[in-house]
Amino acid sequence: MKKVITVCPYCASGCKINLLVENNKIVGTEAAMGLTNQGELCLKGYYGWDFVSDTKILTPRLTQPMIRYKRGEAFTPVSWDEAISYTASRLQEIKQKYGKDSIMVTGSSRGSGNEANYVMQKFARAVLGNNNVDCCARVCHGPSVAGLLKSIGNGAMSNSIVEIEETKCILIIGYNPSASHPIVARRINRAKQKGAKVIVCDPRKIETARIADIYAPIENGCNVAFVNTLMNIVLEEKLQDQRFIDSYTENFDAFYEVVKKYTPEATQDITGIKPEMMREIARTYANAETATILWGMGVCQFRQGVETVQALASLAMLTGNLCKPNVGVGPVRGQNNVQGACDMGALYNILPGYQSFKDPEIRAKFAKAWGVPEISAEPGVPLTEVPNAVKEGKIKAFYIMGEDTLQTEPDLHAVREAFKQLEFVIVQDIFMTQTAAEADVILPATSCAEHEGVYTSADRGFQRFYKAVDAVGNVKDDWVIISEIATAMGYPMHYNNTKEIWDELRELCPIYKGVTYEKMEGLGYVQWPCYDESAQDTGTQYLYKDHVFDRPGGKGELFACDWLPPVESVSEQFPLILSTVREVGHYSCRSMTGNCRALANLAEEPGFVQMNDQDAKGLGIKHNELVWVISERGKVISRADVSSRTNRGACYMTYQWWIGKCNELTGENLENLAKTPEYKYSAVRIEKINDQ
Ligand code: SF4
């Protein structure tokens, strides 16, 4: 038996694992002493590995390239030569016929690794000649990236996962740590044991609310009003850090003009929180010696996601909770490598290393390195705008790597219609997902245990993972497949290994220059920025040590705006708010965890709809009963999970189930800047099945 070090492929806590391998099979796991997990794992880390050996519990591994030469007909297994040349020639044909902007590609925030994401965005920018590349950050922490870039200059956690347990106050808003990042949740528990105050602001009484010093059951969709009110109290009660404001921030006057209106009495009807509790939250946070804010999708997946992130960054600046250890702003990234996909520039408006595609010098640098005349100065198409771009005839081909668009995007009916209009769909994945089943070409890739590379965890930490087993079937590494298509399209792209890709990236991105493979060897953990290759530069545990923000002039921007209600509103016909949520046993579109025996046994199709016991009683619905959940976009079957932990007037579903897909119900309602859908607020009704 051999032990191979890897990084958990599920959430962005970045837990290190020893895979126990015997006869080319993963037979067990051990928690390794990684920086963030320190010898601990959650159930997914321990039991989430048998998918690699193709259990076929939910869906089979893709083990052979396949082409569907004609829509409506079956897939034909083909050789790699045929798959690559067919794909390349169809893409060339579409590019020539409709222009360079007619093809869209995705990065993958799952097991592919940073190198594959770098190569994919290079494929878009150097081979296709556009910026039409995006990743699942668009539907999750896109607003965190955009909001933090605007406020303080870096779209990532300012501090580190390891610091969470040393802080004196943790303000958790729109984030369910025990379901999303169990190892982060443990650090919150430890902080509490060490005396930290824990404040949970969430409409549902989530697990962490049970250990909270203050649990604020805020109304769904009130975030901007809620954070404005906290900032109003900080200023009215003179709890601010005036020296920090005067020295390191700008825009106070315009900011205060907005915030002064948001007294706790004025916002009580919007937030649902009584003024006394609101004051207690503001005082607890502002008076703490050190305080950190953690947030998740309950902040981002609203029409004012970016503004809420900017407001949270402003709250941290007002109270001096940045630029030092054990404080900060913490967008805790969901998928294991969504931070990495963003770091690599798998974004329609940002080049690798968060360099601006609007800067001619930066574009020229990339063009020279990649041997092309220019990099497009036009932003690409955001992932969430693909259905509209297809409808308008702008996008004709879609190359999807490690994403299950037909499961995870909002308003699936609209996405399906767009797929019908696309002339060419390529899916590169490890499983026959809902999206792969609709493809014209399937390119089977190696899983995360079958290749090596680097992931980034939520706190900017780069870590290496290693190949543990030989691949199942006739599959190739993601970066190899992309390189072969690029070469077949007339752009020679050759790498011998992932290190060559990584070193090319380092040369082009100053903030990663010092992150060598050697520094990340074994259990190594290097957080960007890391500028110097010397062993002395071990990266950056927390940002802005010198109090200079990465913005023009070096100051942070205080920001506040008026609260807007969510786009949809409940009505007599659709009286409940539907919000999408996570569950601890499953990950993303479930193609991996649904194929792991232990995890698959935790629950069965269809998934659940959590609802309040009083609402259920009014509808005559019992716990575990099958129900219809209906919105103006669709109708799905689900199982009622009735309890008092869910607030009245709202219900909650996860997006992972194949029967009862909640994204049949959700609406697009994109946030203005980050183009993230308002998954947290769709109007629905729930009916007993026998009422039909
Ligand atoms: Fe750690 Fe997240 Fe994996 Fe659980 S799912 S073991 S918390 S990385």
Image (tube, rainbow, N blue to C red):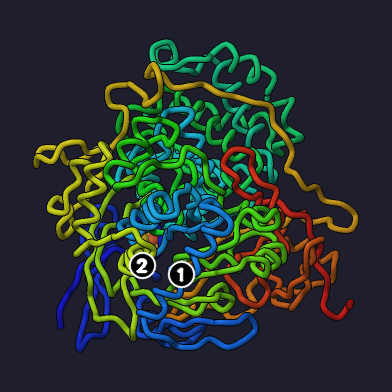
Q: In the displayed structure, does residue 368 sit left or right of residue 356?
A: left
State which quadrant residue 369 falls in: top left
Q: Where, quadrant-wise, is the N terminus in this rendering?
A: bottom left
The answer to whether residue 182 of the structure is visible from this angle is: no
Q: Please, is residue 116 above or below residue 168 in the view? A: below
Q: Is 436 or 150 nearer to us in this picture?
A: 436
State which quadrant residue 264 falls in: top right
Disc 1 target residue: 89
Q: In the displayed structure, does residue 613 sit left or right of residue 26?
A: right
Q: Position of residue 116 (x, y in %)?
A: 34, 60
Disc 2 target residue: 488
Q: In percent of the image, x 54 and y 21: which residue is there?
A: 234
Q: Please, is residue 355 above or below residue 179 in the view? A: above
Q: In percent of the image, x 45 and y 24: which residue is there?
A: 317
Q: Is 95 or 592 nearer to us in this picture?
A: 95
Q: In percent of the image, x 46 and y 55: which residue is there?
A: 334
Q: In percent of the image, x 76 and y 35: which residue is there?
A: 269
Q: Where, quadrant-wise, is the C terminus in this rendering?
A: bottom right
